[in-house]
Amino acid sequence: MRKKTKVVAIAWAQRAARMIFAVLRDGTRYEPQAT
């Protein structure tokens, strides 16, 4: 795996983890902010 691919995978995993943590903490569905 190339380094760039690994960095992207790690960034995506951290983002997913934050979403999951927010759902568990607040007990609500995750809804991204509309821009």
Image: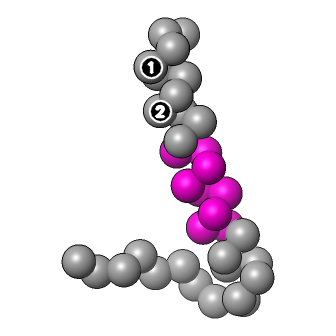
Please give the name of the residue rendered at 54% of the width and 10% of the height, measured from the top-left corner.
Answer: 1
| Helix, strand or loop at mark 1 | helix
Q: Quadrant of residue 32?
A: bottom left
Residue 15 lies in the magenta-colored region: yes
Res. 4 mark = 1
Please give the name of the residue rendered at 67% of the width and 67% of the height, measured from the top-left corner.
Answer: 20
Q: Is residue 15 above or below residue 20?
A: above
In the image: residue 21, left or right of residue 6: right
**Residue most toward the top?**
2
Please give the name of the residue rendered at 58% of the width and 84% of the height, measured from the top-left corner.
Answer: 29
Q: Is residue 2 above or below residue 23?
A: above
Res. 8 mark = 2
Q: How is the image coloured?
A: one colour
Mark 1 is surrounded, within 10 Å at the Cα level, by few (under 14), some (14 to 19) or many (20 or more) other residues, namely few
Q: Position of residue 27 (x, y in %)?
A: 72, 89
Q: Position of residue 10 (x, y in %)?
A: 59, 36
Please give the name of the residue rendered at 54% of the width and 23% of the height, measured from the top-left corner.
Answer: 6
Res. 27 mark = none
Using the numbered discs, state the Cα–Cα distance from disc 2 to disc 1 in whole angstroms: 6 Å
* Magenta span main SS: helix
Q: Amino acid at mark 2?
A: Val
Q: Quadrant of residue 17?
A: bottom right
| Helix, strand or loop at mark 2 | helix
Q: Amino acid at mark 1?
A: Lys
Count of numbered circles on the image = 2
Q: Quadrant of the C terminus?
A: bottom left
Tell me the magenta residue range: 12-20
**Residue most toward the right?**
25
Q: Are marks 2 and 1 in contact (CB under 8 Å)?
A: yes
Mark 2 is surrounded, within 10 Å at the Cα level, by few (under 14), some (14 to 19) or many (20 or more) other residues, namely few
Residue 11 lies in the magenta-colored region: no
